[in-house]
């Protein structure tokens, strides 16, 4: 007898449909507030030593919904820049009246990101991912979600194994063409190919809300490496 085959495309469609349910319980005003807060971060570009790209409003929305849905207790991020992605994820968790911990590093920037929530944010300024991962390992901090919006170093890989990345959700920004997200996926493949399934970035139609599309324009290029052990079948 043949098995039920679910390919990465089928699974990706279903994944984003489920994550979108995290918008339930929030009002248009909540999303407008989130959008205004992340747009206000643009003024921090004045402090940048390396003035580069920040995630799109649409990526910020999906990062918010992902963390609102999965409620990670510890998040590690490579590539802080002006904090759009980091704050979107923190706000996603806090929208459940929970707190989280964000550890975020940037090798070329040391920007002060304003934050008024209750979560614990630690900025590794002018530090690369290897330095941050080494410190997290020394302090026995194992993130349950990683957001990679920089280029992973070769030395990061054994540290990620020590940080139990095989158990964690991994978000990869810029997953298109030959951009860094694809290079990072290749780098990680060797350590998570058996534990994780690849979810392609959400397609424009995966956000089936004109209202959210208007508040958060652009496209999202965030792919997800999702640990199969976090998949559960439910009756309803
Ligand atoms: C695209 S920007 C990050 C944007 C940020 N996530 C946001 O939403 O504002 C990429 C940043 O990652 C930093 N970066 C790249 N590779 C890195 C690494 N291995 N460790 C730490 N920072 C890194 C760069 O200096 C750059 O500032």
Image (tube, rainbow, N blue to C red):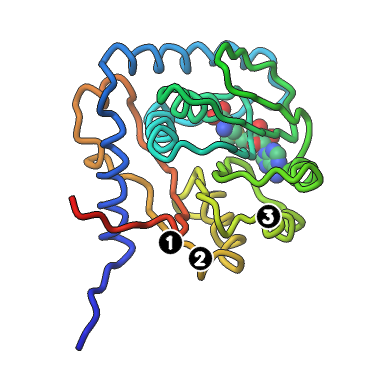
- Quarter of the figure with residue 160: bottom right
Q: Which residue, given by chain and number where applicable, does mark 2 sit on? A: 195
Residue 213 lies, in percent from the top left, at 26, 26
Mark closer to the chain start, 3 or 2: 3
Q: Does the residue labelled 1 lie within 8 Å of ligand 1?
A: no
| One can see residue 53 in this view | no
Q: Are marks 3 and 1 in contact (CB under 8 Å)?
A: no
Q: Which residue, given by chain and number where applicable, does mark 3 sit on? A: 160
Judged from this view, the residue extending furthest toward the front is: 235
- The residues bearing labels 2 and 1 have C-alpha atoms spaced at a distance of 6 Å
- Circle 2: is it few (<14), some (14-19), or many (20+) Cα within 10 Å? some
Q: Answer with left or right where residue 10 lies relative to residue 134.
A: left
Instruction: Say which residue appears at 50% left-offset and 65% top-offset.
Output: 195
Q: Which residue, given by chain and number where applicable, does mark 1 sit on? A: 228
Q: Answer with left or right where residue 176 lies relative to residue 232.
A: right
Count every numbered label the image shows and give the total.
3
- The residues bearing labels 3 and 2 have C-alpha atoms spaced at a distance of 14 Å
């Amino acid at each position: 007898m043949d098995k039920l085959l679910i390919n990465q495309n089928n699974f990706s469609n279903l994944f984003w449909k489920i994550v979108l349910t995290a918008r339930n319980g929030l009002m248009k005003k909540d999303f407008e507030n989130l959008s205004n807060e992340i747009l206000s971060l643009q003024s921090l570009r004045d402090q940048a030593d390396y003035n580069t790209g920040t995630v799109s409003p649409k990526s910020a929305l999906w990062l918010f919904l992902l963390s609102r849905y999965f409620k990670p207790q510890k998040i590690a991020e490579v590539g802080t820049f002006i904090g759009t992605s980091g704050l979107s994820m923190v706000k996603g968790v806090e929208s459940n009246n929970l707190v989280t911990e964000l550890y975020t590093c940037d090798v070329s920037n040391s920007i002060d990101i304003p934050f008024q929530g209750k979560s614990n944010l630690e900025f590794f300024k002018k530090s690369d991912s290897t330095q941050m991962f080494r410190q997290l390992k020394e302090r026995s901090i194992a993130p349950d979600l990683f957001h990679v919006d920089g280029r992973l170093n070769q030395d990061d890989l054994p540290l990620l194994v020590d940080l139990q990345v095989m158990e964690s959700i991994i978000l990869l920004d810029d997953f298109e063409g030959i951009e860094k997200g694809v290079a990072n996926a290749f780098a990680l493949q060797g350590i998570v190919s058996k534990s994780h399934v690849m979810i392609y970035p959400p397609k424009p139609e995966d956000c089936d809300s004109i209202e959210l599309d208007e508040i958060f324009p652009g496209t999202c290029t965030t792919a997800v490496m999702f640990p199969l052990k976090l998949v559960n079948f439910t009756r309803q």
